[in-house]
Amino acid sequence: MNGRDLSQNRAVSVATADQGPSQRDGRVVAGALELAVVDAPTASAGGDMVSSSAAEQKGISILNSQASPAPMGEYGGPDYHGLLEGAARASNIGKVSIIPLVFLIFYEVSGGPFGIEDSVQAAGPLLAILGFLVFPLIWSIPEALITAEMGTMFPENGGYVVWVSSALGPYWGFQQGWMKWLSGVIDNALYPVLFLDYLKSTIPALGGGIPRASAVLGLTALLTFMNYRGLTIVGWVAVFLGVFSILPFIIMGLMAIPKLRPKRWLVVNLHNVDWNLYLNTLFWNLNYWDSISTLAGEVDNPSKTLPKALFYALILVVVGYLYPLLAGTGAIPLDRELWTDGYFSDIAKILGGVWLTWWVQGAAALSNAGMFVAEMSSDSYQLLGMAERGMLPEFFSKRSRYGTPLIGIVFSASGVLLLSWLSFQEIVAAENFLYCFGMLLEFVAFIRLRIKYPRASRPYKVPLGTIGCILMIIPPTLLIFVVLAFSSLKVMFVSLAAVIIGLVLQPCLRYVEKKQWLRFSISPDLPDFEAPGNENAAESLIE
């Protein structure tokens, strides 16, 4: 039985085999709105009411019986071959529960205080402390709230790509996916390098040359294999690594108490602030809350689990930064030039001795490994979600026997190896630049969907009206423009070149699909609300 027969048996009407891409242009999928209904009844194709839990158990895609499914990416011919079987196999893979999810978010955003040292070097103790107090209010909380609402509204692996596609159309959805994936890969290129940086004081050979290059390659291969083995394994590895990485800083903070001098926290010199380094350090250490949305399809009961996990992770991240920052700046006389990557291991030696230094260095190295596997999970599942929506060729949607997106993992790992030669500050600035563009699209999509589908089911909803939501995103939007304005010309030109590639790549993929050089398929499990005859389906989902 092929995919067409299967979809008919599931009461899904499919496009005719002779329907070309041009006939499908302009029809935008509103997204998986009804899949967000976890506790509410959902209208079936024939007008009957079925519970969302029943729909989840049976994998039902509830569509208007007269509607032809329009692909999210304006791609996707009538062929559904292979995707349904892959979806069925994926449903048997263990889902991620709340504790591993908290630590996956922790590692996608933070991973611990490693890397925050530059904030003290750039601006001094007072501004560094204030930055990690105020920045979460301006940026992290709004982004986490938006992720909680949209991630439960669209619980599928496309994540923010689906949000933007539903609100602004498939072209901009693809651009969102391109910029966010590229930003994530650039970010991930940093972690093998940082891993080795924390070990080179103990193993000097890792400082450069062939040994370092070989170590980067081997480490990337090892961590990539871990992603291949399954998201559940990655989640529990993240829990272990998180506990191991947090404990030495708890001990260091306790040892710092007798030496604390609160006046050291108040040191500031506004005439000697590297604002570019300061803002990029804060931004890099407190963003990427939306990355977990690309794993929403792998989460156990996402409507309840995802918001809770974001809340707990937010507390863990902010406290995990402020606690060692207060300990280090309050207990050690200030020398701003020393506050650079790896300085916390020196502080640990001063406060606790060599054994604590080794623990901090080991924690730093393993923390980078945790951030790598968490980020690669997000990036690779995003590609899978885009393929299931017809935005990428079908082979991106294929899963391994462990349920993982094999091709997405290979592509993400290849990007990491190609970019690992960049310097730390270049990587941070480049990924922040691309990430900012993607966040602007997310903010617009969030508000537009509030206006476009005000009564659609939102298992979690930001407790603000539309006007309140607009006011909430004004500060982070202004911050985005500040970060962009401080970017160097080199970073700006390289990042804009990457954006232009995305603008051209989407039409090229449409042409490839039109010529049938590669197969593009739409998963029949994914719903469509803007196909003909189904325009009001989303509004039938009452909050």
Image (cartoon, helix red, strand yellow):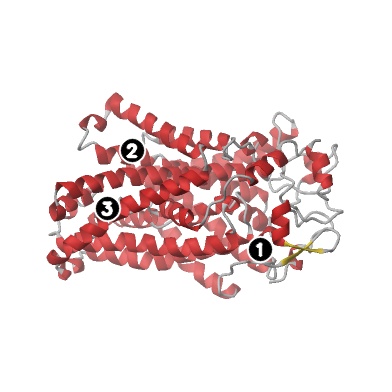
Relative to residue 155, is residue 124 drawn left or right? left
Residue 416 shows in the view: yes
Between marks 3 and 2, how big is the CA–CA gap? 17 Å
Left of 433 or right of it: where is 528?
A: right
Expressed as whole percent of the image width and height from the top left, the position of residue 292 reads 51, 53
Q: Nearer the viewer, residue 251 or 455?
A: 251
Cα separation between marks 3 and 1: 44 Å
Which mark is drawn over residue 118? 3
- Say which quadrant the C terminus sits in: bottom right
Depicted 500 relative to depicted 207: above or below:
below
Q: Single out the mark in the foreground, 3 or 1.
A: 1
Mark closest to the chain's N terminus, 1 or 2:
1
Residue at mark 2: 193
Residue 38 badge: 1
- Residue at 69%, 48% in the rendered image: 72
Instruction: Say which label, 3 or 1, has the lower sequence index.
Output: 1
Disc 3 residue type (three-letter): Asp
User: In the orientation shown, which residue stands out farthest toward the top?
Assistant: 210
Q: Name the residue rendered at 57%, 34% in the picture.
A: 407
Helix, strand or loop at mark 3 = helix
Q: CA distance from mark 1 to mark 2?
A: 42 Å
> Dot 1, crowdedness within 10 Å: few (<14), some or many (≥20)?
many
* Secondary structure at numbered mark 1: loop
